[in-house]
Protein backbone atom coordinates (compact mmCIF):
# COMPACT_ATOMS: atom_id res chain seq x y z
CA UNK A 1 0.00 0.00 0.00
CA UNK A 2 1.43 3.38 -0.99
CA UNK A 3 1.85 6.04 1.64
CA UNK A 4 -1.09 8.48 1.70
CA UNK A 5 1.32 11.27 2.61
CA UNK A 6 2.63 11.64 -0.91
CA UNK A 7 5.18 10.18 -3.30
CA UNK A 8 8.82 11.11 -3.62
CA UNK A 9 10.28 14.37 -2.54
CA UNK A 10 11.90 12.93 0.55
CA UNK A 11 15.34 12.77 -1.05
CA UNK A 12 15.31 9.00 -0.97
CA UNK A 13 14.19 6.14 -3.17
CA UNK A 14 12.75 4.64 -0.01
CA UNK A 15 9.02 5.35 0.42
CA UNK A 16 7.71 7.02 3.53
CA UNK A 17 6.13 4.77 6.15
CA UNK A 18 2.37 4.52 6.35
CA UNK A 19 0.63 6.20 9.28
CA UNK A 20 0.27 3.87 12.27
CA UNK A 21 -2.28 6.02 14.12
CA UNK A 22 -6.00 6.66 13.86
CA UNK A 23 -8.01 9.76 14.69
CA UNK A 24 -10.57 9.00 17.37
CA UNK A 25 -14.06 10.35 16.92
CA UNK A 26 -15.02 13.14 19.29
CA UNK A 27 -16.75 11.78 22.37
CA UNK A 28 -15.23 8.30 22.19
CA UNK A 29 -15.05 6.98 25.77
CA UNK A 30 -11.45 6.46 26.91
CA UNK A 31 -11.99 2.73 27.48
CA UNK A 32 -12.87 2.33 23.78
CA UNK A 33 -9.67 3.98 22.49
CA UNK A 34 -7.29 1.62 20.71
CA UNK A 35 -3.51 1.99 21.13
CA UNK A 36 -3.45 3.54 17.63
CA UNK A 37 -6.09 6.11 18.66
CA UNK A 38 -4.19 7.01 21.83
CA UNK A 39 -1.03 7.50 19.78
CA UNK A 40 -3.06 9.65 17.36
CA UNK A 41 -4.11 11.86 20.28
CA UNK A 42 -0.51 12.17 21.48
CA UNK A 43 0.70 13.21 18.02
CA UNK A 44 -2.09 15.69 17.30
CA UNK A 45 -1.06 19.31 18.06
CA UNK A 46 -4.69 20.40 18.01
CA UNK A 47 -4.89 19.24 21.62
CA UNK A 48 -2.16 21.79 22.46
CA UNK A 49 -4.50 24.53 21.26
CA UNK A 50 -3.79 25.61 17.69
CA UNK A 51 -6.00 27.86 15.62
CA UNK A 52 -9.57 28.01 16.89
CA UNK A 53 -9.19 24.83 18.95
CA UNK A 54 -9.02 25.15 22.74
CA UNK A 55 -5.96 23.87 24.58
CA UNK A 56 -6.66 20.58 26.36
CA UNK A 57 -3.03 19.69 27.08
CA UNK A 58 -0.12 21.90 28.11
CA UNK A 59 2.68 22.52 25.61
CA UNK A 60 5.23 20.81 27.85
CA UNK A 61 3.18 17.60 28.03
CA UNK A 62 2.60 17.57 24.25
CA UNK A 63 6.28 18.19 23.47
CA UNK A 64 7.48 15.53 25.91
CA UNK A 65 5.00 12.96 24.57
CA UNK A 66 6.11 13.77 21.01
CA UNK A 67 9.76 13.50 21.97
CA UNK A 68 9.13 10.07 23.49
CA UNK A 69 7.32 8.89 20.35
CA UNK A 70 10.21 10.17 18.19
CA UNK A 71 12.64 8.19 20.37
CA UNK A 72 10.51 5.04 20.04
CA UNK A 73 9.49 5.22 16.36
CA UNK A 74 11.85 7.71 14.74
CA UNK A 75 11.29 11.19 13.35
CA UNK A 76 10.01 10.04 9.94
CA UNK A 77 7.19 7.96 11.43
CA UNK A 78 6.28 10.77 13.86
CA UNK A 79 6.10 13.33 11.03
CA UNK A 80 4.03 11.02 8.81
CA UNK A 81 1.63 10.50 11.72
CA UNK A 82 1.53 14.25 12.43
CA UNK A 83 0.57 15.06 8.83
CA UNK A 84 -2.02 12.31 8.84
CA UNK A 85 -3.78 13.44 12.03
CA UNK A 86 -3.75 17.08 10.93
CA UNK A 87 -5.25 16.23 7.55
CA UNK A 88 -7.89 14.04 9.17
CA UNK A 89 -8.67 16.62 11.85
CA UNK A 90 -8.75 19.65 9.58
CA UNK A 91 -10.99 18.30 6.84
CA UNK A 92 -12.85 20.63 4.50
CA UNK A 93 -16.17 20.30 6.31
CA UNK A 94 -14.64 21.37 9.61
CA UNK A 95 -12.94 24.34 7.96
CA UNK A 96 -16.24 25.37 6.38
CA UNK A 97 -17.92 25.25 9.79
CA UNK A 98 -15.16 27.36 11.34
CA UNK A 99 -14.65 29.91 8.59
CA UNK A 100 -18.01 29.79 6.79
CA UNK A 101 -18.91 28.82 3.24
CA UNK A 102 -17.73 32.14 1.75
CA UNK A 103 -14.06 31.24 2.22
CA UNK A 104 -11.50 30.27 -0.39
CA UNK A 105 -12.56 26.63 0.08
CA UNK A 106 -15.46 27.12 -2.35
Image (cartoon, helix red, strand yellow):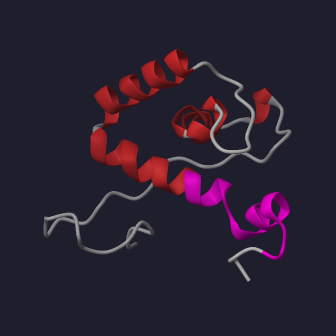
Q: Say if the magenta span includes residue 51.
A: no
Image quadrant in which the N terminus is located: bottom left
Which quarter of the rendered picture does the C terminus lie within?
bottom right
Q: Is residue 90 magenta?
A: yes
Q: Position of residue 79 (x, y in %)?
A: 38, 47
Dominant secondary-structure state across the stretch colored magenta: helix
Q: Position of residue 76 (x, y in %)?
A: 29, 47
Residue 14 vertical position relative to residue 56 in the rendered view, above or below = below
- Whether 97 is drawn above or below 22: the answer is below
Horizontal side, residue 18 vs residue 11: left or right: right
Residue 80, image x, y percentages: 40, 53
Q: Which residue is located at x 23 percent, y 70 percent?
A: 9
Residue 53 image point, x, y percent: 73, 40
Across the whole image, how many numbered discs are drawn on residues? 0
Start-end of magenta stretch:
86-102
The residue at the far bottom in this view is: 106
For the point 40% across and 59% down, which residue is it? 18
Closer-to-camera residue (39/64): 64
Quadrant of residue 47 within the rendered picture: top right
Left/right placement of residue 71 relative to residue 25 reads: left
Q: Residue at x 63, y 58 (%)?
A: 88
Residue drawn at (61%, 36%) of the image = 41
50, above or below 66, in the image? below
| Residue furthest out toward the left | 12
Q: Nearer the viewer, residue 18 or 5?
A: 5
The answer to whether 22 appears left or right of 43 in the picture is right
- 97 w.r.t. 106: above or below: above
Amino acid sequence: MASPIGPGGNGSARPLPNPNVVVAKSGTPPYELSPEAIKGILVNPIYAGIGPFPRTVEDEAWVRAGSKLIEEEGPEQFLVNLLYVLRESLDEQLLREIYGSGSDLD
